[in-house]
Image: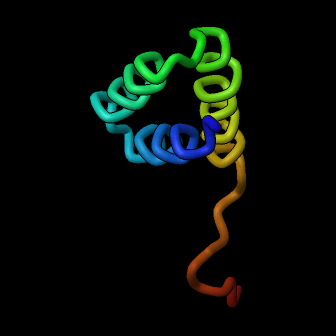
Amino acid sequence: MLEAYIQAYNDAVFETDKQTALNVVNRALQEGFSAEDIVFKLVIPAVEQMMASSNKTPTPIWPNTS
């Protein structure tokens, strides 16, 4: 049930769009989701995913020819 909110929240977080992220959380609360569900199923996983993606070594665009 939270899938649409998860996607919208993740998109907002990765775009660093604070207002949209907050709007997603507020909509989920208005729809009746508990604060606990929002924190543990929406916010924390998004932060963990963002941290994991920022820890990856980027693939070089140009091959190393040295």
Residue closer to the observer: 64 or 16: 16
Determine whether, in the image, residue 36 is placed left or right of residue 20: right
The single residue placed furthest to the left in the displayed view is 19
In-front residue for pair 52/25: 25
Residue shown at 39% from the left, 46% from the top: 15
Residue 32: x %, y % from top left: 52, 17
Q: Position of residue 49 (x, y in %)?
A: 67, 40
Say how many tags the image has.
0
39 over 58 or under it: above or below: above
Q: Which x, y percent locates residue 18?
A: 33, 29
Q: Residue at x 71, y 42 (%)?
A: 52
The foreground one among 13 and 53 is 13
Q: Where the C terminus falls, by quadrant? A: bottom right
Quadrant containing the N terminus in the rendered view: top right
Q: Residue at x 46, y 23 (%)?
A: 31
The percent coordinates of residue 65 (x first, y second) are 69, 90
Left or right, 15 with reference to 3: left
In the rendered image, the residue lying farthest to the front is 32
Tell me which residue sits at (61%, 29%) in the image. Answer: 42
Front-lying residue, 13 or 41: 41
Question: Toward which corner of the image does residue 25 lie, by quadrant?
Answer: top left
Vertical relation: 58 (above or below) 37: below
The colour scheme used here is: rainbow
Q: Quadrant of residue 22?
A: top left
